[in-house]
Image: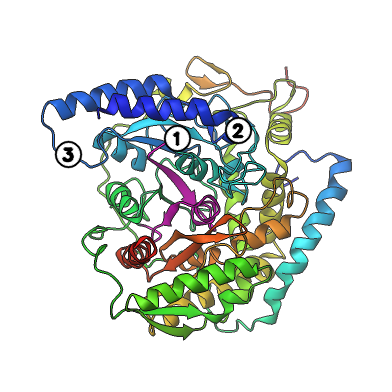
Amino acid sequence: MTSTELLGRHLAAIERQEPRIRAFLRVTEDLARTQAAEADRRIAAGENGSPLLGLPVAIKDVLCVEGVETTAGSQILRGYRPPSDATAIGRLREAGAVFIGMTNCDEFAMGSSTENSSYFPTHNPHDVTRVPGGSSGGSAAAVAAGEAVYALGTDTGGSIRQPAALCGVVGMKPTYGRVSRYGLIAFASSLDQIGPFTRSVRDAAIVLQAISGLDRRDATSADRPVDMLSEVELGVEGMRLGVPREYFQVEGMEPGVKAAVERAILTLERSGAELVEVSLPHTDYGLAAYYIVAPAECSSNLARFDGVKYGARDEDAETLLDTYLRTRRNNFGTEVRRRIMLGTYALSAGYYDAYYKKAQQIRTLIARDFEKAFEYCDAIVSATSPTVAFPIGAKVDNPLAMYLNDVLTLGGNLAGVPGISVPCGTSDGLPVGLQVLAPQWADATALRVARAYEVARDG
Amino acid sequence: MLARLGLEPGEEDFYVEQLSGILAHIDRLREVDTTAISPTAQVVPLAHRTRSDEPRPGLTQEQALANAPEARDGFFVVRAIQEGEP
């Protein structure tokens, strides 16, 4: 099949599915057709290049694509056309990827259901009355609905892994520093990472291989060898997998989710892994620490949206201060405003030690919990999300209930470790995800365990 | 005011109620003894990375202004900085 034919099939799927799913904010058909034709020329010329050559990819609306409107799901960036590609996007462009469209997400990636998009909610392909998870809900839904071969998302507290779990696809957050954040519209810079959504673990390894590596435009990108593929088929025979008891006792854990994940862990044991109980004793404080650190960083990052340099501006303002106030009042949504207020408060004089410094100290303890646990095991296995996909509207009025969706994933961001979610059956007919966390830089180990589960599951 | 969000009086009550609930949850951090625990701002050990101070190509003035709501003569246009200015 040619790239152009493959694109045609996916555009047809988009036309068929989008009225009920709404995964895309923008379908970039013209750009995709040009790139597919170019890929076909490269293939015809005998190029034996990247495995991604000619494959359609959906891109979360927080990753800058040169010349293509990129809004972070926010009204404040409507009309913004980036002058250059994000590094991850540029690497895919060079590999010959076909950019099929920009996917819906919670505004500035703040949310766990994609309902905070300032455009419209996205619907879960497994049940359109339910959310796809978030914040990268559009990317997860696009892959689940067959509208793209793979997608890119971003994960600050679980925003790749949780929607992957809720939509029944594979999603991975690499080690902090693996993938350059240049050109990613920042939410919380010490936590944000870019990663793939795919239908198989092997595909996730291929995409991660393509986008990882040192980039001088992101000083936190790591100068380390990138080898995501050579271990992926090795299996779990002889590996030790840690089961953190606290992760099975979190508030709101659904019995059906717990049962599906326990079955998956026993499947890994039958495949030759040794299970060991480990402890992450500060789990109960992770959510609280995260909801100081992330809003603090976001309140600083989002100060740049002032109606002067790009995006929307309120034209009725009479003074510069009025421009700031009116532009931000009229173009930021409720959740973004809530987090800016929380972050500004936590950083303000008089509260800094009680909140921000305290949360950073808890972050140290959480990172140490992971270091200690990994002394006893090669990887940690748990549920990705305590629940299956919930009905649209069920949690929008209760921010704390919404935040609890991320309780099993945000520890991985606070500690900077890699994590992958792989589908592991259903509960009440809805997908459940198995999360595999590995030590920093052992992304290949997380992929290996997830792949071993996939093989045993499908075996 | 510090966050420049332009809150309306009616909105304040809405956010006060929600943020109080979130802060009540966050207050559980006080249960943890963090004496002598150093804070973590950045979780992956990295040294400061330097590069030679050489000019590199960046955005052109035209590119930098292309997304501005209003630009003139190579500048961003803003409203008066002081009230009462024309």
Chain part drawn in magenta: A148-177
The amino acid type of the residue labelled 3 equals Gly
- Marking on residue A147: 1
Q: Is residue A231 above or below residue A198?
A: below
Q: Is residue A245 left or right of residue A172?
A: right
Q: Is residue A176 magenta?
A: yes
The answer for which chain carries disc 3 is A
The amino acid type of the residue labelled 1 equals Glu
Snapshot quadrant of residue A268: bottom left
Closer to the chain start, of discs 1 and 2, is 2
Closer to the chain start, of discs 3 and 1, is 3
Residue A438: x and y in percent read 39, 70
Q: Is residue A225 left or right of residue A172?
A: left
The answer to whether one can see residue A368 in this image is: no
Q: Residue furthest front?
A: A459
Residue A177: x and y in percent read 37, 57
* Element marked by disc 3: loop
Camera-nearest label, 3 or 2: 2
Q: Residue at x 37, y 60 (%)?
A: A458
Q: Residue at x 56, y 82 (%)?
A: A281
Name the residue that disc number 2 marks. Answer: A20
Labels 3 and 1 share a subunit: yes
